[in-house]
Amino acid sequence: MSTATADHQTASAGRRNGATTGRRLAPHPDRLLPPDPGVRAIARSIYSSVAGAPIYSPHGHVDAALIADNRPFGNPAELLITPDHYVTRLIHAHGIGLDQLGVKNPDADPREIWRLFCSHWDVFAGTVVRYWFESELSEVFGITDVPSAETADQIYDQLTEQLAKPEFHPRELFDRFNIAVLATTDDPSADLAAHKTLAADPDFHGAVVPTFRADRYMSPDVTGWKGYLDELGQAADIDTGSYAGLIDALKARRAYFKECGATASDSGMPDAYAEPLPDAECERIHQAGIAGTVTAEDAAAYRRNMLYQLAAMAAEDGLVMQLHADVVRNYDDASFQRFGPDTGHDLPGPSTFTRGLRRLLNDFGRSETFRLVLFTTDETAFSREIAPLAGFYPSVYVGAPWWFIDTPGAIARFRAAAIDSAGFSKTSGFIDDTRAYCSIPARHDMSRRVDAGFLAELVATHQLAEDEAHDIAAGLVGRIPVNTFRLDRYAR
């Protein structure tokens, strides 16, 4: 190797690891705001008016027990890396095994996990993950060093020291983050003990509410379906060996969830089709599922019937129905077999809602009690289907960009695509959809900045008065999510 080549590779490695940049983690106060000085000034004013507003997080995956137990976080890797598949999937894309990052591997060295993350800091450049981490490390933990192979141990030690302090325990951070409502995602068989503990604690400020998610009971071809039915039957004290028993058990558990503060359900389905079947046909397929002889065609028909039945229940009990559809779940067979679901190998697929939901919306779309929030990872569906549906049906709301498109650029495109047909008030407000507890304020702040920029452009082009833009910005972080998810009792 020539001396020139060696010098080039050494310099490249240094740049990769942040060793030669001399940068510090100091997020710019105008980050994500428009570059035009005049528009930026308007955006600054709008953003500053909502920057400190309470956070409403009506859909996410933080465990309520984390906050109820209020134990110190274990270590930086356990908190920030291993459970966050936004992070692990991109490092995996560069040849690092998920087990090396602690996924389903309790023997992994947390310090080594952190070193892997820091030495791959460059792969996150330009991504929303980099944006969240810069905000989180700097503003939550006071870290000033840029992650790199050289700084990894120092940052790890700083974070470990911080996490041991009482002010970095989950409940204290809940208050510091100014969270008004945090919704979790829960199986119908869950006892919701942590939610009840928090609701009964007079010293806890805020609300942690459950969300009813019945996905594993919807498809009789899912491995372990009979066991899931038995768990649900035990929780509801209803025999779920029949289709009628399953329906009764789900209704009973929905009532229990409402008693424990739930305002919404969620369904993550392979497609957005809801078609009812005759009860006798459902019973036939139900028994085939228990026997393990159900066909793929019958299982799909049963699942689509169940989605319709959940809508009928929502029209009766008023739980807001969320539908996340058309993601190709567990795409990588080897990863699924070794690590299980929700480990970074779900992938977006094309979405369609209009045809598949026609029967459901014809039956429930004008009901005062029914409410449906539609989510997609297919950006084209916002302007083509979801926003037009929300622009007609009183019950339909446009869910915020989710998973692969909850990024600054995609959020701006979402606003442009959805507002024309649906307006601001028929959108959901920002959804962080996260397991990464400490990233919640960074994610919501990102959305507030992008929305401030979008509104500022409307002011600058004389489509909105500035005071109206301020009012809409306040609505997007307050009354709009409160109204959409029926969170009035928890509103601040």
Image (tube, rainbow, N blue to C red):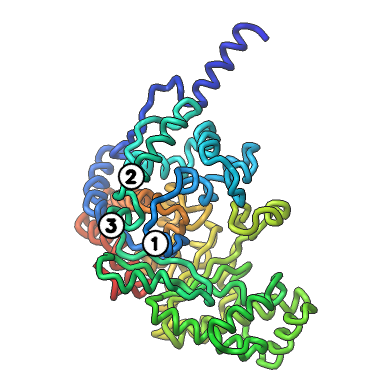
Of marks 1 and 2, which one's residue comes earlier in the chain? 1
Q: Nearer the viewer, residue 34 or 150?
A: 150
Toward the top, the furthest residue is 3
The answer to whether residue 271 shows anywhere in this view is yes
Q: Is residue 206 left or right of residue 78?
A: left
**Residue in view at x 36 percent, y 42 percent:** 135
Check the image and report above or below for 21 versus 228: above
Q: Residues within 10 Å of mark 1 (few under 14, many from 20)?
A: some
Across and down, in percent, residue 126 comes to 47, 38
Q: Residues within 10 Å of mark 2 (few under 14, many from 20)?
A: some
Q: Residues within 10 Å of mark 3 (few under 14, many from 20)?
A: some
Q: Which dot, 1 or 2, sits closer to the camera?
A: 1
- Three-letter residue code for mark 1: Asp
Check the image and report above or below for 191 versus 403: below
Across and down, in percent, residue 324 comes to 54, 66
**Secondary element at tag 1:** helix
Q: Which residue is mark 2?
A: 140
Q: Which residue is mark 1?
A: 69
Check the image and report above or below for 422 versus 462: below
Of marks 3 and 2, which one's residue comes earlier in the chain? 2
Q: Which mark is residue 175?
A: 3
**Residue in view at x 25 percent, y 57 percent:** 53
Of marks 1 and 3, which one's residue comes earlier in the chain? 1
Q: CA distance from mark 1 to mark 2?
A: 21 Å
